[in-house]
Amino acid sequence: MKEKIEIGVIGGSGLYEMEGLEVLEERTLDTPWGAPSDAFVIGRLEDRVVAFLARHGRGHRPLPSELNFRADRYGMKVLGVEWILSVSAVGSLKIEYAPTDILVPDQFYDRTRHRADTFFGNGLVGHVPFAEPTCPRLMEWMAQGAREAGAKVHFGGTYVCMEGPLFSTRAESNVYRSHGFDVIGMTNLQEAKLAREAEMSYATLALVTDYDCWHEEEEDVSGAAVMEVIHQNVRTAQRSIRNAVRLVPPGERSPYVGLLANSLFTDPALVPEATLEALRPIVGPYLPDDGD
């Protein structure tokens, strides 16, 4: 395929079925960290070539803690993606964020414990700025796309990323609320971290499905209730992503391209060859080629 794949979309497999998407091919990739969650579906949408990936694979098989975040992001990088548009389900921690609303978070808070969330290590140290974990420009395009789709959109806020797979205890939910956090989910933090390390822009549409378990007048969150609202949100998510894809200017480079130039701390001569080879699509421009 000669056309560049600048945009990647991560979400449920229902995104493959959006109106106006022409599927061109499915591409199965291998990575130094194993297989991604599924084959990448390459399609044409709004006259752009886009790479789609089902976060949990078709059929929703792995737990959030079992997702191969590094392989998924690495695959996007190898395909040439610079803008990652994410869609995910979240619980609301504030009364003003009702089920079927969408929040576009600009901050994350980490409550995970068992996940690989960096490309670095094995002889190569990288320290990448992450104070603002989502891309402001991409946030604007995604929020505008969701508004055009008819969604009630809240711009900015903190997404708490929990380990799962169980939902929160009531004590945990109330502590998160006392900190002023906005929504809670199980996947987006690692996606954002790895996208930043790979110099890709990342933003997410957090689709509210429930009030977690803090709301005394609402039933405690359950899988059945979440799935019911997710099914209601699928059409809105499809229209939102389609609109956002249209808003990303063709040829526009991610503002994070070049970020690693001042983020790699290891003497290049000391980086093991196996590490360099594995990370060449990410760090190649900043470390010597073979024979240099």
Image (spheres, rainbow, N blue to C red):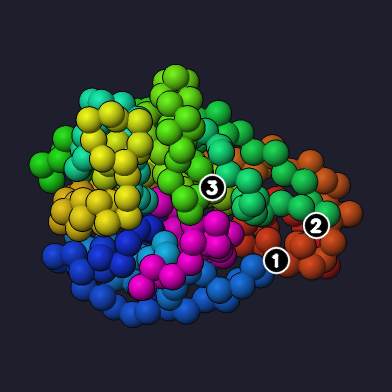
Crowding near the residue tagged with mark 3, few <14, some 14–19, many ≥20 C-alpha atoms within 10 Å: many
Q: Residue at x 64, y 68 (%)?
A: 33
* Badge number at residue 21: none
Which residue type does callout 2 highlight?
Asn
Judge whether 62 appears above or below 188 on screen: below
2 or 3: tag closer to the N-terminus: 2
Q: Could you tell me which secondary element the residue under label 3 belongs to?
A: loop
Q: Nearer the observer, disc 3 or disc 1?
A: 3
Which residue type does callout 3 highlight?
Glu
* Badge number at residue 122: 2
The residue that mark 1 highlights is: 278
The residue that mark 3 highlights is: 163
Residue 49 visible in rendering: no
Which residues, given as a range, are shown in magenta?
A: 57-84
- Residue 234 coordinates in the image, percent (x, y): 20, 57
Q: Residue at x 62, y 53 (%)?
A: 115
The answer to whether 150 appears left or right of 31 in the picture is left
Judge whether 279 appears above or below 177 on screen: below
Q: CA distance from mark 2 to mark 3?
A: 25 Å
